[in-house]
Amino acid sequence: MSPQVEPNEAKRVTLATVARHAQVHVSTASRALSDDPAGVGADTVRRVRELAEMLGYRRDAGAAALRTGSSRLIGVLVHRLTDLALATMYDSIDAAAAAAGYSAVVANTLDDPAHRSARLDALMSRRVDGIIIADSHLGDTVGYDLQRRGIPYVLAMRTLPGLLSVSTDDHTGGRLAAEHLHSLGHTRVAVIAGDLQASTGIERSQGFLRFFEAAGHPVPEDHVVSSGFGTAAGRSAGEKLMALPKPPTAIFAVDDLTAIGAMGAIREAGLRLRDDVALVGYNDIDLAANLPVPLTSVRSDLEEMGRLAVDALLRRINGQEATPILLPPVLVPRATTVP
């Protein structure tokens, strides 16, 4: 027989309401609705959960966090979720968190310290169990502050000295791009370096530049443009390089969207991709292979990175050791460099 619900009771259903309809003690109803209903019979668990759904009961996550000391929430800081590489990684974070019984809450920081601090405070007010930081910069103190306070954290995609991180071996990735272009005969090359306050911009650029220096073809300073990330930044940097007295015959952009922006500048200069200017990006987002001229890119396994970041964070939440991880990059040649 269906429970008789008073008018408007669904709007104010409490745990006590569920317990009354199920004819059990409130503590029993609470355990039956928890992630671990140990000590409650299977029939009771099923009855309580069915009644809770029928009555429209919604568990108070804040109250549960106070009782158990765990919110089952993971906070994620990104500079912009519109960045396709970060969106790909976040999808993996969200799926891995859900598989472990957690929910992921993402916040955009706009790569701004004040925004980052405000977003972190908002996440902490929700009593998240740990933080994944995907927007770290040189000079940032967020990771160090969390470490000092004993709050579980892990850096993802980017790195900082002395902090736990899951990322790609970006120095090797930059070298792979350099080796590829050098093997095709390019010696007048340039780098669109992204953000040189982020490890992704620094290490990818360094790996590339050091290879060409060792090969006897050091890259001139005016052929290295610190651009920021994204298509608009890539377009602006590409225009600067195309305006040089002798434009480069090959460009390495440390991010795929930045490389796509540079494509527009190359075409605007009346030059052809690959034939006049070879181009290599980084991350190998899905879009790279599906452009009118598919983009050569250094693959960073963003899905694996997200999964491993969640794994490392959960280990820390559970009081276990976690060690930094560097995933191996892989160069994927396409039509912007080879026939």
Image (cartoon, rainbow, N blue to C red):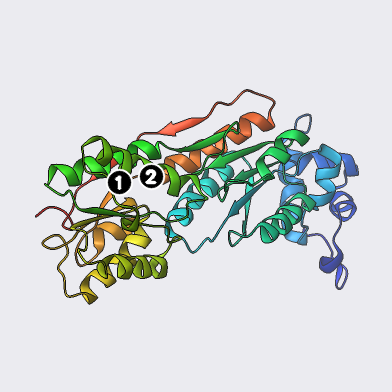
| For residue 55, above or below residue 73 | below
Q: In the image shown, does 329 or 265 lie closer to the viewer?
A: 265
Q: Could you tell me the amino acid type at mark 2?
A: Arg
Query: Is disc 1 surrounded by few (<14), some (14 to 19) or many (20+) residues within 10 Å?
Result: many
Residue 191 in the image, given as x and y percentages of width and height: 32, 54
Quadrant in which the N terminus appears: bottom right
Residue 153 placement: quadrant? top right
Q: Residue at x 38, y 67 (%)?
A: 231
Q: Position of residue 317 (x, y in %)?
A: 68, 32
What's the amino acid at mark 1?
Val
Query: Vertically, is 229 above or below 212?
Result: below
Q: In this view, does 58 lie to the left or right of 172?
A: right
Q: Name the residue under label 1.
A: 298
Nearer the observer, 105 or 85:
85
Q: Do the residues labelled 2 and 1 touch (CB within 8 Å)?
A: yes
Quarter where residue 98 is shown: top right
Tell me where residue 17 appears, x and y as whole percent. 88, 56
Q: Earlier in the sequence, mark 2 or mark 1?
A: 2
Determine which of the numbered discs, if any, sits on residue 204 in the image.
Answer: 2
Q: Which residue is drawn at 81% across and 66% down?
A: 10
Viewer-side residue, 124 vs 42: 124
> Is residue 213 something that shows in the picture?
yes
Q: Is residue 195 left or right of residue 172?
A: right
Residue 329 visible from this viewpoint? no
Name the element at disc 2: helix
Residue 108: name its quadrant.
Answer: bottom right
Residue 110 x, y percent position in the rendering: 59, 62
The relative height of residue 78 versus residue 42 in the rendered view (above or below) is: below
Question: Which residue: 73% across, 48% down?
Answer: 49
